[in-house]
Image (cartoon, coloured by chain):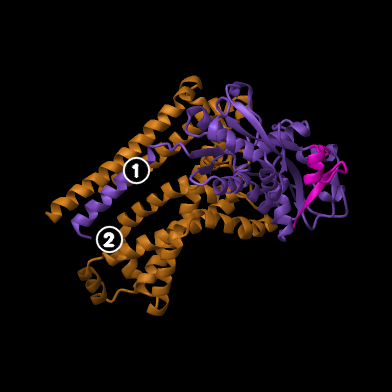
Amino acid sequence: MRDALLRFLSIMAALVAGTLLLLILGELVRASWPALRSLPLGGWLLSGHWAPSEGEFGLGAMLAASLITSVLALAIAGPVGVFLGGWLHLSAPARVASPLRALQGVMAGVPSVVYGFWGLVTLVPLVNLWAPPGAVLITAVLVLALMILPLSVIVTDAALHQVPAPAMQAARALSLSRWGTFRKVMWPHVRGSVASGIVLQFGRALGETMAVLMVAGNVLQWPSSLTEPVRTITANIALEMGYASGLHLQVLFLSGLVLLVMVIFSMLLVRVGVRS
Amino acid sequence: MSPSRLIVMLLVAGLLLAGCGERDHDTLILTGSSTVAPPLSDIAADFEAANPGVRVDIQSGGSSRGIVDVRRGTADLGMSSRDLRADEDDLLSHLVARDGISLLVHRANPVTNLSDEQVRKLFRGEIPNWSELGDFDAPVTIVHKGEGRATLEVFLEHFQLNNGEVKPDLIVGENQQGIRSVAGNRGAIGYVSIGAATHEAESGTPIRSLAIDGVTPDADTVARGDYPLTRNLILVSNGPPEGLLADFLTFVHSDTGGQRFQKHFFTPAGKGD
């Protein structure tokens, strides 16, 4: 009876989640359909000229900014998270490890707008000292990296707990060094789950809105240097949604659709990667 | 959790959801501009206290959302910090207050007054350092608003700037973000709603409002019509207001309503407008 109920509830939950995603996709397509039909296909994806009041709707520069900030944030948070997770599991004294684990849990739960506000009042003035105006690409990358670091530590830490005990005993019997154990015994076991955890974080970084809006500077231009302001797709939606109407509004929905498709694509990539 | 408790909870959740569909006769729903929402929330609380059994729900989400919601009938009134556009003339607009937009610099900046021409040059990127305007060596950082913002439109119109000419170093959304950005950068210049700027400056944030051509931005100069950078705060209805809605609009225009706008540093439009 209990199993049947649990099964029923799980299936329902899965159906609701799936249906919601489909509904969102459907609504995005519906709301952006007129724009999809009236704009020259491809042109809006590649052009970097976004000036809604002049009828210019190029998403290119903002798409590039979204991708570059997210990829760079992963490039920082991924390796640091793996090493911190490995250190927590292998070498950290228990006195340090358990409070640090708890801290990572708390950090993962802090709403992103808090990271954004911290970035705006603390990090931006600091970066401003060597790269005015301070709210630039690298600031956004640092805030994003800090946001996703806790989860990549937690994922690595959890994955390392799954390494089979016989493998660890064998490593000890061979008197491998800690680094050797991590590199040759543990890493091959956890590589897949750590990688998929990191790519899941890519979706989070790509979709992050408020934190990026506050620290990226939001000037419309192709991302050309770490010390120039950029505007991401999400920041653009947050900036302009409240006031947009007509074709402008439809294109904002369209940019949301493009973002959702990119996130879904990266999730599919994880699934394919985990299977192979 | 036992299965029976779970089922009870699901039932309750279902009932709550079902309740969402109904529109009560003594409930008013207002959505729209995040600038208009705070004073209107205060007024709504007063209105509820004076009319037991009546509920007024206020939700912000931008002027355009308010206009769309009124059209669809999901809101009784829309709040907007810009006037209706030509393609929105199917709706009725009710002027409730005026808001000024103030130029803002860091408190360390000794400049207190700028001419229209100086502002134009600054925002076109023709003045790269404050040393050209006063005894203050800091690179100019232009804090600009995102396209479509009502504040931006008022700003561009007054200074006769085309948005393409402006060379921003930083683009912000809400007033708060603009204020924090100026407070964190000695060379920054931006513009925000007078109400927000006055409130922040009084609570110790290192910012200062600038006079434009000698006119300081405050509630008095806005009320007299001396201060040039102002915009209308309006409520939007679909057709002439009747019944409870008419009562509420009268209340917004009353002295009590006016005091609420003043508390938020806006200039009430008064009756008959």
Give the letter of the purple chain.
B
Quadrant in which residue B148 is drawn: top right
Disc 2 designates what residue? Answer: A189
Quadrant in which residue B99 is drawn: top right
In reply to whether residue B55 is colored magenta, the answer given is no
Q: Which mark, residue B17?
A: 1
Circle 1 packing at 10 Å, graded few (<14), some (14-19), many (20+), is: few
Residue A245 is at least partly visible in this image: yes
Which amino acid is tagged 2? His
Q: Nearer the viewer, residue A255 or A131?
A: A255
Give the letter of the orange chain.
A
> In the rendering, at what x and y percent does residue A207 appear?
46, 45
Cα separation, mark 2 vs mark 1, equals: 46 Å
Kind of element beneath mark 2: helix
> What residue range appears in magenta?
B206-228
Q: Nearer the viewer, residue B114 or B150?
A: B150
User: Left or right: where does residue A197 sit relative to residue B269?
Assistant: left
Circle 2 packing at 10 Å, graded few (<14), some (14-19), many (20+), is: some
Q: Chain of mark 1?
A: B
Which amino acid is tagged 1? Leu
